[in-house]
Amino acid sequence: YYPEDPVANHNVAAVAISRGDYEKARRHMEKCRNHDQAYNNLGILYILDGDYENAEKSFKKAMSNGSKEAEHNYKNMHSIRDRKSNKR
């Protein structure tokens, strides 16, 4: 393991998100904020927190760097938000 490598931290954060360990994901995201794909994962964390404004900003940053995953997540973000607001 390479604790300062942005790719390694990005990968650990992605796995942590998939396992529901958002605090661990945040810790590792902080170490790779300048990695292009990190913005996509950060957007996902913001959605999970209900912070759609920052999620949108993160996805747009990732999309500007060519992330197809972020484009997909950005398009789906609105339906996720709508579903959550309808449950209230």
Image: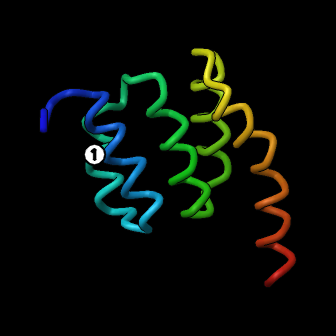
Q: Looking at the rendering, which quadrant does residue 6 occupy?
A: top left
Report helix, strand or loop for mark 1. Answer: helix
Q: Looking at the rendering, which quadrant does residue 74 occupy?
A: top right
Looking at the picture, does residue 87 appear above or below residue 75? below
Residue positioned 61% across, 24% down in the render:
67
Looking at the picture, does residue 43 appear above or below residue 65? below
Image x and y of residue 19, in percent: 42, 65
Q: How crowded is mark 1: few (under 14 residues within 10 Å), some or many (20 or more)?
A: many
Residue at the disc numbered 1: 28
Q: Residue furthest bottom?
A: 88
- Residue 20 left/right relative to 43: left
Quadrant (top left/top right/bottom left/bottom right) for the N terminus: top left
Residue positioned 39% across, 62% down in the render:
22
Q: Looking at the rendering, which quadrant does residue 54 occupy?
A: top right
Quadrant (top left/top right/bottom left/bottom right) for the C terminus: bottom right
Amino acid marked by disc 1: His
Image x and y of residue 84, in percent: 77, 72
Is 18 or 61 nearer to us in this picture? 18
Image x and y of residue 33, in percent: 36, 31
Residue positioned 37% across, 66% down in the render:
21
- Residue 67 left/right relative to 8: right
**How is the rendered protein coloured?**
rainbow
Is 18 or 25 nearer to us in this picture? 18
